[in-house]
Image (cartoon, rainbow, N blue to C red):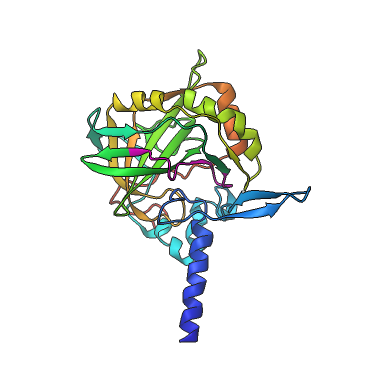
Amino acid sequence: MKASIQNVALLATLFLESASASCGHGTSMMKRHVHMKRDLNGGLQKRVEVATFGYLGETGPTNWDKLAPENAACRTSKVQSPIDINPETSTLVEAGKLKMDFPHLEGAEFENLGSTIEVIMEGKNATTTVDGKVFNLAQFHFHTPGEHAINGEYMPLEMHMVHEAEDGALAVIAVPFQLCEAGGSNPLLNALLPSMEAIREPGKVTETGPIDFSGLIAALEVQPLRTYSGSLTTPPCAEGLTFFVATQTLPLDVKTYNLMKSIIGFNSRFVQNAVGADNLLAL
């Protein structure tokens, strides 16, 4: 009995280590872990747990299943994300089908998880309604380059807006950004820029300035999206997520992009096989 309890405790510890900073971060699947740490002046600073997985070398996507037992799906699951978004791999969602209600915020917690940078939306009363079902926005984070391909084309940046319903169902709105020759500054990204240097170091936590989502909502609600059933794009690669992928890009200026990728680094999982086909790592 004692050995069994120890084994359960070990597995729980491994799960927390592998799941920390995952794309499901902040949901009931993967709770956030923050702590206080003293700085050089003796003051206390909030710190967030950083990822134990990576994107290069031995901690990268081709070896995620070896990092912890519960990551086996990364190699064996036939329902994995990201994928190439096209008419054969996804279903069209008509414009206006998703109803987003995100309030104007005076600020939100902004974190560097080591695997991405993330804005915490828990308790902000931001919701997306799909076919009458309400999903609460838990957080949004970024991938450079974008993870989903759209008809075979990669984008330089992709935002994942991770939602959870009362029954635990997860839905992710994936928003690709494209570089614009004429500048094309984006109000949502501009709201984060002044705070980015403060979280350049993994584990750092700060506050954003005011965030206005009206431009984002206007852009997403007037375009059709593509949907499919997929998985977390990070360990433990758990199935059961519904993705809604925007097919019309949002503008991204070069200066903003260069700053974001200098902090985030490379954090894109390679495109997976079509849903239902053999896992590429198992072939």
Instruction: Magenta stretch: give its range.
Output: 112-127
**Residue 60 or 31: which is nearer the viewer?**
31
Left or right for 181, reference 166: right
Residue under the point 66% across and 43% down: 201
Q: Is residue 34 above or below residue 7?
A: above
> Which quarter of the image is occupied by the C terminus?
bottom left
Count of numbered circles in the view: 0
**Residue 214 or 87: which is nearer the viewer?**
214
Q: Is residue 114 magenta?
A: yes
**Residue 283 or 244: which is nearer the viewer?**
244
> Which quarter of the image is occupied by the N terminus?
bottom left
- Could you say where residue 151 lies in the image, as x and y percent from the top left? 34, 31
Q: Is residue 229 above or below residue 222?
A: below
Residue under the point 49% across and 85% down: 2
Q: Main secondary structure of the magenta part?
A: loop
- Could you say where residue 268 lies in the image, as x and y percent from the top left? 49, 42
**Residue 86, image quadrant:** top left
Residue under the point 47% across and 66% down: 69
Residue under the point 56% across and 22% down: 254
Q: Residue furthest right?
A: 41
- Could you say where residue 56 lies in the image, as x and y percent from the top left? 57, 48
- Could you say where residue 82 lies in the image, as x and y percent from the top left? 39, 43
One can see residue 89 in this view:
no
